[in-house]
Image (cartoon, rainbow, N blue to C red):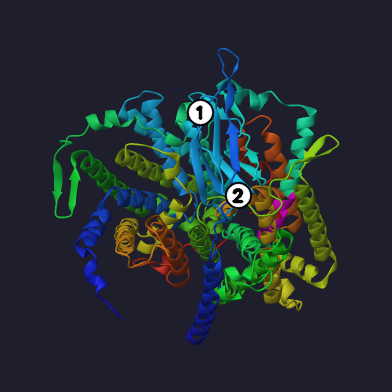
């Protein structure tokens, strides 16, 4: 490469980096405490079955903390002789009560360790009830084996499909980027976090969170908006992030001739950098969106599902079908598949490969952002969820066939259903381990994945 | 601009700390882990993104040897080695026949899985969950020839007897493994491994089983990483799952790339530079926060500790683009061509 090109490229890259850093610093610039009020509190009662007497007895001295939906500390307490703990809160709203598992009596555990935090919606002048299920040593084992019923299988399959479509949206970008450029983007999890956190930002603060002077402007500029409006904005930001990442980081690297392995290590470095900027700006406390958080499930035949899960899963399926049609029918979609198949051949037949790659990054960024918001809505919003999801995405794309868009979809559904169903036999906290075991077995038996073709792997 | 803040900072303390950390147990652990990584990436061209998993395996193997199987220290170390070997087999057997990036994907995931397993309630009776193993140090302390209450060393490099023992053991291990790597890479075995890194097809055409050599390299580097974990366990007198978080692997990578990939000495040099720099930055940051030079509205003391992740992430990315051979490496020794 000539040095003049290198310098110009460096300049453009720096501008891009500055834009990204400025945007990231704008993220969550301010947090306003909620107004104080009177009688609201969060309450829970800890009871478990004593393995010797078989009676339900209160768990004494269990430590809990309560945070508001901003993750700000509200109060803490200890369960009394009846196992009851009550913590006054500042006003109506959604609160998270977190149990310190270490403070549970000897031999008593949370039945579902992933639910150490319970969401409580506190209405004006009411007490919000948090529910924690405790089990003794026998029950923690029994929970893993004793509830294989047809109903449980159906319910878990539905939950798995729901998570699978979210995962598929997040995974398609990674798979398409790999297909068109050969790069495995280890920072893809940060694209997921990006959407999740921006949606939080707009949900609570609007654009005024970045541009202070907009305070007092109408929503979404001056104040937070309903999540339904915050999501499209977050997706737009995700697309922008994807575009900028390609334009200012990865395209200059391709032009410079940085090898793929070096580029992979670059994505690793970027992923740590971005993830810890998220931690700095968002703090380590998981939080929840302001809307649609504490919903009760509705009965649909044999299954129970919250309306928000139903709607987000529906939107995801629609978008996945749309992506499929796009890849199959449009010129750009065909060009993407052509570049994935054979980049040189595609280029020589007149396809603008750089443009295709750019579109792939924009699509991947937007889809990852949307997947991130939906996962944040169905679980919680946290700074490092991207990394956890990234491992599942890897399992999904390798299982489905690395580099194929449909493979990512199939793999994600298999992983989603697989990890949910695996909780029938293994403890919930280890369900992601199952996904990895699946990945390793798949590599042994069919390394090209379910939909991959053989010459890709060797 | 007012530069009087320069005098408010205790530079002597910062420099002493930086010098000491450059050769202390952390630097030893990172150097050993990076020596292992050098065998993987520098010589065999293997993309191991889960070196922290090997470190965890070594630490847990040794710790469990004492607390769970009640063995003597020598057998416990052997168990640590076996854990690392088994981990290498689990990762290597399915992936080493495939393209390089499959190993990367599987290792990064497997290392995190090891941590999740170790801290899970299901394994609590063995691994003690998040509290970790705390009762294995006794038999090792009995081997300590130094007086625990005495202080050893000079200048900023002063350790209590127990810590000094670990430091001596650690640097001895580094010396032994450097010697081993140096001799191995000059041997016919090392030449085959490097040939596979350069051109796998050509090596296969000469009748060498690339798969088998790569697996051996993965095991060797993994065991060296396992020793890093054992030194870490001895230094901390405890093994906790949350020592082994994923970003640690990329600290090791930075250490390796800083020194220069594919050079025998580079991991040690990289580790010394890394720890001196990181300690300097963190202590300076903490003091600036304490003295009010950085307002707490921008950053508090716990957040200063996050700076290292930014530095590592940015440095890793920038080094790979602008100077992939690090300080002492040569570009010819870099296995950077995919496929």
Q: Is residue B29 above or below residue A44?
A: below
Q: Is residue A113 above or below residue B53?
A: above
Q: Residue at x 36, y 32 (%)?
A: B134
Q: Secondary structure at mark 2?
A: loop
Q: Residue at x 61, y 39 (%)?
A: A437
Q: Quadrant of residue A53?
A: top right
The answer to whether residue A451 shows anywhere in this view is: no
What main secondary structure does the magenta stretch of the protein show?
A: helix
Q: Is residue A171 magenta?
A: yes
Query: Closest to the observer: B238 or B257?
Result: B238
Tag 2 subunit: A
**Of circles 1 and 2, which is in front?**
2
Q: Quadrant of residue A414?
A: top right
Whole-percent x, y for residue A392 in the image: 63, 48
Neighbour tally class for label 2: few under 14, some 14-19, many 20 plus, Cα within 10 Å: many
Instruction: State how far apart marks 1 and 2 are (Cα).
Output: 24 Å
Q: Is residue A131 left or right of residue A154?
A: left
Work out which residue is located at the far top of the displayed protein and give it: A53
Sequence-first tag of 1 and 2: 1
Look at the image and give the residue range highlighted in magenta. A165-175
Q: Are marks 1 and 2 on the same chain?
A: yes
Q: Is residue B292 left or right of residue A140?
A: left
Tag 1 near tag 2, CB within 8 Å: no
Q: Is residue A182 left or right of residue A412?
A: left
Whole-percent x, y for residue B1 in the image: 31, 81
Query: Closest to the observer: A185 or B281?
Result: B281
Q: Is residue B71 left or right of residue B40?
A: left
Whole-percent x, y for residue A428 in the image: 62, 35
Q: Which residue is mark 2?
A: A91
Q: Is residue A218 magenta?
A: no
Q: Which residue is mark 1?
A: A80
């Amino acid at each position: 490469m000539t040095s003049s090109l290198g310098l110009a490229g460096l300049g453009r890259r720096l501008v891009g980096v500055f834009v990204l850093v400025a945007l990231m610093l704008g993220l969550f610039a301010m947090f306003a405490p909620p107004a104080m009020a009177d009688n609201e509190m969060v309450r829970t009662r800890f009871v478990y079955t004593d393995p010797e007497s078989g009676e339900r007895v209160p768990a004494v001295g269990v430590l809990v903390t309560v945070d508001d939906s901003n993750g700000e500390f509200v109060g803490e307490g200890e369960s009394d002789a009846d196992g009851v703990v009550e913590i006054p809160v500042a006003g109506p709203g959604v609160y998270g009560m977190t149990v310190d598992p270490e403070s549970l009596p000897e031999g008593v555990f949370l039945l579902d360790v992933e639910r150490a935090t319970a969401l409580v919606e506190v209405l004006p002048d009411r007490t919000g009830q948090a529910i924690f299920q405790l089990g003794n040593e026998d029950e923690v084992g029994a929970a893993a084996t004793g509830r294989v019923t047809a109903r449980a299988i159906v319910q878990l399959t539905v939950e798995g499909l729901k998570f699978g479509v979210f995962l598929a949206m997040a995974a398609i970008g990674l798979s398409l980027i790999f297909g068109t450029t050969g790069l495995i983007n280890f920072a893809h999890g940060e694209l997921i976090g990006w959407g999740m956190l921006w949606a939080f930002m707009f949900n609570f603060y609007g654009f005024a969170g970045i541009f202070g002077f907009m305070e007092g402007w109408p929503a979404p500029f001056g104040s937070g908006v309903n999540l339904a409006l915050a999501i499209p904005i977050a997706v737009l930001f995700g697309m922008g992030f994807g575009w900028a990442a390609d334009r200012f980081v990865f395209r200059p690297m391709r032009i410079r001739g940085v090898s793929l392995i070096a580029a992979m290590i670059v994505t690793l470095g970027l992923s740590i950098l971005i993830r810890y900027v998220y931690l700095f700006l968002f703090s380590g406390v998981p939080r929840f969106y302001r809307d649609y958080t504490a919903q009760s499930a509705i009965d649909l035949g044999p299954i129970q599902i919250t309306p928000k899960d139903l709607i987000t899963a529906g939107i995801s399926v629609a978008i996945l079908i749309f992506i499929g049609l796009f890849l199959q029918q449009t010129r750009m979609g065909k060009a993407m598949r052509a570049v994935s198949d054979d980049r040189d051949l595609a280029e020589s037949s007149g396809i603008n490969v750089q443009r295709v790659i750019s579109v792939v990054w924009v699509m991947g960024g937007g889809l990852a952002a949307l997947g991130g918001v939906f996962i944040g809505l169905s679980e919680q919003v946290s700074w490092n969820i991207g990394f956890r999801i990234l491992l599942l995405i890897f399992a999904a794309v390798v299982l489905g066939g690395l580099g194929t868009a449909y493979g990512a979809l199939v793999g994600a559904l298999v992983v989603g259903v697989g990890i949910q169903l695996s909780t029938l036999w293994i403890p919930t906290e280890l369900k992601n381990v199952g996904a990895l075991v699946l990945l390793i077995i798949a590599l042994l038996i069919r390394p090209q994945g379910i939909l991959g073709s053989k010459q890709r792997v060797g | 601009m007012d530069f009087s803040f320069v005098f408010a900072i205790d530079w002597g303390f910062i420099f002493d700390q930086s010098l000491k950390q450059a050769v202390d147990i952390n630097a030893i652990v990172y150097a050993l882990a990076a020596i292992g990584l050098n065998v993987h990436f520098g010589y065999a061209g293997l993309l191991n993104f889960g070196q922290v998993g090997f470190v965890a395996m070594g630490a847990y193997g040794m710790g469990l040897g004492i607390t769970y199987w009640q063995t003597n220290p020598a057998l416990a170390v052997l168990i640590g080695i076996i854990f690392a070997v088994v981990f290498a087999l689990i990762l290597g057997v399915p992936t080493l026949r495939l393209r390089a990036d499959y190993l990367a994907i599987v290792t990064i995931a497997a290392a995190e899985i090891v941590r999740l397993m170790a801290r899970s309630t299901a394994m609590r009776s063995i691994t003690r969950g998040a509290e970790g193993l705390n009762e294995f140090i006794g038999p090792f302390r009995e081997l300590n020839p130094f007086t625990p209450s005495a202080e050893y060393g000079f200048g900023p490099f002063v350790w209590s007897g127990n810590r000094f023992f670990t430091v001596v053991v650690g640097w001895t291990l580094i010396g032994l493994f450097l010697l081993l790597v140096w001799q191995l890479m000059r041997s016919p075995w090392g030449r085959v491994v490097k040939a596979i890194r350069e051109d796998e097809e050509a090596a296969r055409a000469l009748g060498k089983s690339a798969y088998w050599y790569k697996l051996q390299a993965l095991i060797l580097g993994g065991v060296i990483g396992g020793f890093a974990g054992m030194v870490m366990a001895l230094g901390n007198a405890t093994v906790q799952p949350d020592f082994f978080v994923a970003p640690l692997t990329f600290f090791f990578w930075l250490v390796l790339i800083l020194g220069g990939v594919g050079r025998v000495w580079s991991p040690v040099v990289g580790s010394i530079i890394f720890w001196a720099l990181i300690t300097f930055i963190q202590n300076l940051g903490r003091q600036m926060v304490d003295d009010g030079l950085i307002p707490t509205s921008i950053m508090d003391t716990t957040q200063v500790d996050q700076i290292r992740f930014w530095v590592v992430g940015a440095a890793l990315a920038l080094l790979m683009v602008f100077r992939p051979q690090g300080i002492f490496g040569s570009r010819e020794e870099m296995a950077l061509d995919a496929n």
